[in-house]
Amino acid sequence: MEQWERRREALRRTLGESEADGFLVTSPTNVRYLTGFTGDSTVLVFGRDRETLVSDGRFTTQLEQECPGLAVNIRPSGTELVRAMADLVESLGWRSLAFEAGCTVAERDAMAGLLAGTGLIAVRGWVEKLRSVKDELEIAAIREMTRCAERAFTMVRAGLRPDDTEKDVADAMETALRRCGATVSSFPTIVAVGARAALPHARPTRTTRIRDDDFVLIDWGASGEPYKSDLTRVVATGKVTSKFETIYRTVLAAQERAIAAIRPGATGHEIDAEARSVIEEAGFGAFFDHGVGHGIGMDIHEAPRIRRDSKDVLEPGNVITVEPGIYLRIGAGSGSRTMFW
């Protein structure tokens, strides 16, 4: 049985435990995970004994190539996707339809208007729960994208020059990622010099240069087909002060403590607490205000969550990041941030 069929069978068990007659999958990522289809403007109408992709004529050939054997409903030109989906659901006689709660209010209202005789049930995490447990092929893909990102970092680091701006370095990383095998970057590359490294999602500037401080943070990742990697490094470009070294060693110890706690059955809260306790014991607890990590796969952030309030229980096949950090504010609106993975 190919991977797409195995995934749909697992989802069918979830549907069978619910009161819904069918399930509407609208997330492009989830549609791809369940069918292998890489296009867009397509939904999966999923039932207890059948499934149909509802799409349009632009993807007819692509659907035949990527989803052989899977039923396809090509909507006529001028017919909205939600109308084609509703017509199909009505023809199946379903009295209740689960749908992904991530859709917009407008999309939900449109479905309700077209499916007046069908009860709509918003659900969360049905496919995401399946996606959180990776098989060997998925893990191999994430490893390859991690290696790709590491190769790109080696290239960029070797070429760093004092006059490079943050944007220069970010652009170089984007190019290196593709040269090393990535399709795209996992997210817009973050490059932040000195005090600007306190901004978790800093946008590289055209004015701040490597020479403007003693260190630079680079946060980047490689995305393949379609699995992702996510890495962060702080590179010393000047004098390493005793305070910087203390922070470095604290964050490293926190990361190692969290990694040692990772095992099947552990909760996201427990792993977060292990890292957080190291930082708090060192007196930096007030300067660490985000979760320790997150799942990674087809999306850059997915289950399981590794943070204070997480009740997610780790299972074999989960892939997570471990990224404690310390953020020291230096005046209003600026600071220094040290994060190591």
Image (cartoon, rainbow, N blue to C red):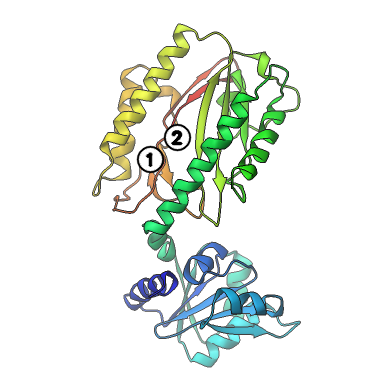
Question: Which quarter shows the C terminus?
Answer: top left
- The residue under label 1 is which amino acid type? Arg
Residue at 67% across / 84% down in the picture? Answer: 75
- Per the image, the residue denoted by label 1 is 307
Dividing the picture into quadrants, the one containing residue 272 is top left
Residue 290 disc label = 2
Report how far apart the C-alphas of labels 2 and 1 lie in the structure: 7 Å
Report whether 56 appears left or right of 53. right
The secondary element bearing badge 1 is classed as loop
Label 1 crowd bin: few (<14), some (14–19), many (20+), radius 10 Å: many
- The residue under label 2 is which amino acid type? His
Residue 134 seen in the figure: no
Residue at 31% across / 35% down in the picture? Answer: 259
The mark nearer the N terminus, 2 or 1, is 2
Q: Nearer the viewer, residue 290 or 7?
A: 7
Q: Establish if 89 lies above or below 157.
A: below
Q: Nearer the viewer, residue 236 or 313?
A: 236
Cβ atoms at labels 2 and 1 below 8 Å apart: yes
Label 2 crowd bin: few (<14), some (14–19), many (20+), radius 10 Å: some
Residue at 51% across / 32% down in the picture? Answer: 232
Q: Establish if 329 lies above or below 221.
A: above
Report whether 207 appears left or right of 94. right
Residue 113 rendering spot, x and y as whole percentages: 61, 80
Residue 152 disc label = none
